[in-house]
Amino acid sequence: MDWPRATLVTFLGSPFTTFLYRSLFNYSEDLDLQKKFRLSNRTLGFDHIYVVHLDHRTDRRERLDEIATYHGLDFDYFSAVSNHDEHILKKYGSADMSPSQKACYLSHYSIYKRMIDRGYNSVLILEDDADFELNITDIMTDIHRDLPASWETLYVGHCFEGIGEQVGKTSSVHRLYKSVFPMCTHAYAVSYSGARKLIELLDPVIPRGTIDYSLAVVISEGDVSSYSVHPQPIVQWIADDNPTDIPKSLPLFFSLLNSTLRFLGHNT
């Protein structure tokens, strides 16, 4: 059937046709957005997740692999500097730190440099003794809504941290606050600008102290824009069969509302 030209022009210019064209045109774009969302969801809203990991601690990796599988997360295991690697340790660090503390410092510092080299806008850094809230994905979705675009470090896990000014108006149990003096480095995120600052501010040759103390100092001095989640949804996992790799460190016990490791059948 031949349509009159006027009718055809009217049809092609109709709102329905415009919607149809727009839908077809944006289909591939929508698929890309969905893919990016899924990828972001596998990294808790960050570009990447690094896990600082000593290769011989296969027990810790096995447990983290269980967590990753359960939550659908992608972990990139970063081989940590060993406290027995005298060739590296003698180049850096203060005599006031133990070999294990020096190795920890250099491991985190190396991740900042790798993050810059690979162009990640944001990275979540975990240590391999981390345990997660069962609803960690939902928690981080809420946190990202409140997180200012200018953030440079975000403490998802911490210890000895005071509660600063609240940011956002979420009614969630886990809320975002300005950081005060966050200690421990078992779960914190760094933005690209934050990593560039930390590379300049934290001198591995003449450090101010351990990595967590040095980070807390530059945050408290206002050199880095930092936020903390309270209560923390990622804690250090403590168990009799999970010995620390840093001798003489003080064991810290923080509980979760719903531990993923406990849910998966592990004693914590």
Image (cartoon, helix red, strand yellow):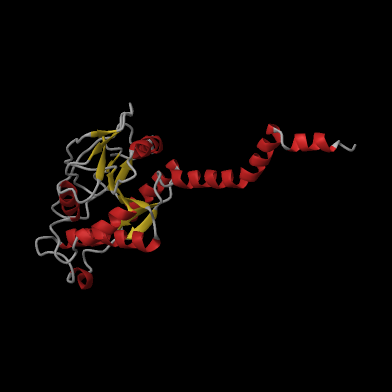
The residue depicted at 83 percent of the width and 38 percent of the height is 5
How many labels were placed on the picture? 0
Q: Nearer the viewer, residue 225 or 103?
A: 225
> In the rendered view, would you say 52 is above or below 31?
below
Quadrant housing the N terminus: top right
Q: Residue furthest left?
A: 96
Quadrant housing the C terminus: top left
Q: Residue furthest right?
A: 1
> In the rendered view, would you say 131 is above or below 192?
above
Quadrant of the image occupied by residue 93: bottom left
Q: Is 226 left, or right, of 221 in this rendering? A: right
Q: Position of residue 34 (x, y in %)?
A: 54, 43
Q: Is residue 24 visible?
A: yes
The residue depicted at 33 percent of the width and 29 percent of the height is 170
Q: Nearer the viewer, residue 32 or 244?
A: 32
The residue depicted at 40 percent of the width and 35 percent of the height is 138
Q: Position of residue 139 (x, y in %)?
A: 36, 35
Q: Is 145 left, or right, of 215 in this rendering? A: right
The residue depicted at 37 percent of the width and 57 percent of the height is 77
Q: Is 189 left, or right, of 6 in this rendering? A: left
> In the rendered view, would you say 111 is above or below 238?
below
Q: Position of residue 67 (x, y in %)?
A: 39, 44
Q: Residue furthest front?
A: 6
Q: Is residue 238 visible?
A: no
